Image (cartoon, rainbow, N blue to C red):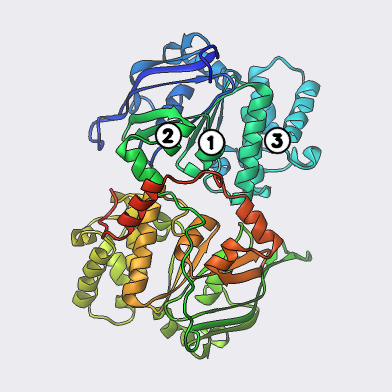
């Protein structure tokens, strides 16, 4: 950006205090940055770095009085946001500043139609009659690329896909054409193709409206795709700021270098896996159909989640199942574990067709096939201490209590936690640590096959790398076979020997990691690969060496 560009937001010395007893005194401390017209500033950092807290302060949405701005200014349109009255801040939100939140399903009112929610913003901030507001709602829904705006205007949020809900959030944020748009992790939970569409949409709307954009993310691939400038935050401080070229290709601060070294890259695939002997798991022609929307005297519709799916997993092999949301990945994994009964086909594990077993006959196989779930906080009982959580499986299969708890402490150390973690509750740990606990629980029964369902999708890139390295290390130590379910092809490339690509319930392509990523055959696989953000950015050579060195070094627990 040139020096003559108009500065829209000027943040000077921003400090946000936390209540007594918090891990640190300030959520954000002495942060300075500017954003100009037509400029997109990416703010990058791990969870707890202060990214979202900075955004909420600018929007006047801090949870006062416990968390409040202790010092600093945020000059927007010539006035300090922090000295404005509550009424002035309400008028500013939507008018001068629009915000896209990370999770649209929690940001949208589930009891209001989406058109009514956009109309509500217009009623609060714009001088328009009902007819003009309705016209504007339709204009906005069409502008963000939603099909059939007239019909969609009358839909409730739960009837929309994740990508459609995020587009509605963007329409609301842009309703009054604000000078500043704040996007807080707007693509974190989205598939790569939907993510690409949302990023292109935000860039297009920025160009058309000449907005300044503050884009919060932990994904450096996204940064490489869209950023003009980058600010890196660590534990509440801005440790590095510069142009995208400077920060991505010549990072100066050790923390920035560590983050970039941890970035997964889809060209880093594994060597070919040597399949020997009989497969541990042989699934043939698996079919699963769900009935939806039926009722008394009313026939529901059928959703085919898995359709004629066949794959094999050999001992010690990791098979990555890749595809968008709704492709049937998780349903397939749950069928293997007996959490869903397949409606057709065979699931042969070590010579036994699991799909023909009743609940009681299936019980012994639960020891041999275990699962790591996507959300460790939801899958860990918050009322139990960690030791009990990890020991629960062995106890259920008759292991003496003292032996089960001793094994739990051993497993906690195996996954990089201290044995004393057994005496603490899940909420006392970070997201990465909770996922380590989930892995320890899955290993407690000494399984032969581990099904990992999106185990790192909600984690920061550095923690993600630690968990992936941990899974790989455990696989080699224990000789585990693994089914790794993910929508992130960069992650799949790192951990998988074999890749199976799923689309609408079918496997459309199978091959070694190298084959699929180097020479994809199916158009859907090609589309997924083309949608990976930041493909034109090459991680600096010295940082790739740093990553390789870290992968060879035993890891402790993440903070």
Q: Give the structural element (helix, strand or loop) at label 1.
A: loop
Quick one: label 3 or label 2, which is nearer the N terminus? 3
Note whether residue 381 is visible: no
> Which label belongs to residue 247?
2
Callout 2 crowding tier (Cα within 10 Å): few <14, some 14–19, many ≥20: many
User: Disc count in the image?
Assistant: 3
Where does label 3 land, which residue? 144
Question: Sequence order check: which comes first, mark 2 or mark 1?
Answer: 1
Classify 229 as above or below 165: above
Residue 339: percent from left, percent from top: 52, 73
* Camera-nearest label, 3 or 1: 3
Q: Residue at x 63, y 59 (%)?
A: 326
- Residue at mark 1: 101
Q: Are marks 3 and 1 in contact (CB under 8 Å)?
A: no
Mark 3 or 1, nearer chain start: 1
Q: Residue at x 38, y 42 (%)?
A: 47
- Give the secondary structure at mark 2: helix
Q: Is residue 425 left or right of residue 298?
A: left
């Amino acid at each position: 950006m040139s020096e003559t560009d108009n500065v829209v937001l000027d943040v000077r010395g921003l400090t946000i205090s936390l209540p007594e007893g918090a891990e640190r005194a300030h959520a954000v401390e002495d942060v300075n940055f500017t954003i100009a017209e037509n400029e997109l500033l990416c703010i990058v950092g791990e969870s707890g770095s202060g990214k979202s807290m900075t955004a909420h302060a600018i929007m006047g949405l801090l949870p006062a009085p416990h968390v409040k701005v202790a010092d600093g200014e945020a000059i927007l349109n010539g006035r300090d946001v922090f000295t404005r009255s509550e009424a002035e801040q309400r008028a500013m939100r939507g008018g001068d500043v629009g915000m896209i939140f990370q999770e649209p399903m929690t940001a949208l009112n589930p009891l209001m139609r989406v058109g009514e929610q956009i109309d509500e913003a217009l009623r609060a901030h714009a001088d328009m009659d009902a007819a003009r507001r309705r016209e504007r709602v339709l204009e906005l829904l069409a502008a963000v690329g939603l099909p059939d705006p007239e019909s969609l205007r009358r839909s409730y949020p739960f009837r929309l896909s994740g990508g459609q809900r995020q587009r509605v959030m963007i329409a609301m944020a842009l309703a009054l054409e604000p000078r500043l748009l704040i996007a807080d992790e707007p693509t974190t939970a989205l598939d790569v193709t939907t993510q690409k569409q949302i990023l292109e949409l935000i860039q297009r709307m920025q160009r058309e409206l000449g907005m300044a954009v503050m884009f919060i993310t932990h994904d450096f691939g996204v940064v490489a795709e869209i950023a003009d400038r980058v600010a890196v935050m660590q534990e509440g401080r801005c440790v590095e700021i510069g142009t995208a070229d400077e920060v991505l290709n010549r990072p100066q601060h050790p923390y920035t270098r560590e983050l970039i070294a941890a970035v997964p890259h889809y060209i880093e695939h594994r060597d070919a896996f040597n399949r020997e002997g009989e497969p541990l798991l042989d699934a043939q022609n698996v079919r699963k159909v769900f009935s939806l929307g039926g009722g008394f005297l009313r026939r529901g519709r059928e959703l085919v989640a898995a359709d004629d799916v066949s794959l094999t997993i050999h001992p010690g092999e990791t098979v990555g199942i890749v595809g968008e949301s709704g492709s049937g990945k998780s349903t397939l994994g749950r069928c293997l574990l007996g959490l869903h009964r397949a409606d057709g086909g065979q699931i042969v594990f070590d010579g036994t067709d699991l799909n023909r077993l009743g609940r009681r006959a299936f019980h012994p196989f639960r020891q041999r096939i275990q699962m790591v779930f996507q959300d460790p906080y939801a899958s860990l009982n918050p009322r139990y201490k960690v030791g009990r959580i990890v020991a629960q499986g062995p106890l259920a299969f008759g292991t003496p209590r003292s032996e089960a708890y001793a094994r739990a402490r051993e497993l906690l150390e195996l996954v990089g936690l201290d044995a004393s973690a057994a005496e603490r509750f899940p909420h006392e740990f970070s997201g990465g640590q909770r996922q380590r606990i989930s892995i320890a629980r899955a290993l407690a029964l000494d399984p032969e096959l581990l099904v990992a369902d999106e185990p790192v999708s909600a984690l920061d890139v550095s923690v993600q790398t630690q968990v992936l390295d941990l899974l790989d290390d455990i696989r080699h130590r224990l000789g585990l076979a693994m089914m790794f379910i993910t929508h992130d092809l960069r992650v799949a490339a790192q951990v998988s020997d074999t890749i199976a690509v799923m689309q609408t319930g079918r496997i459309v392509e199978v091959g070694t990691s190298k084959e699929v990523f180097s020479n994809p055959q199916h158009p859907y696989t090609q589309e997924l690969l083309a949608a990976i953000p930041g493909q034109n950015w090459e991680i600096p050579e010295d940082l790739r060496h740093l990553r390789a060195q870290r992968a060879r070094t035993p890891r402790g627990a993440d903070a």
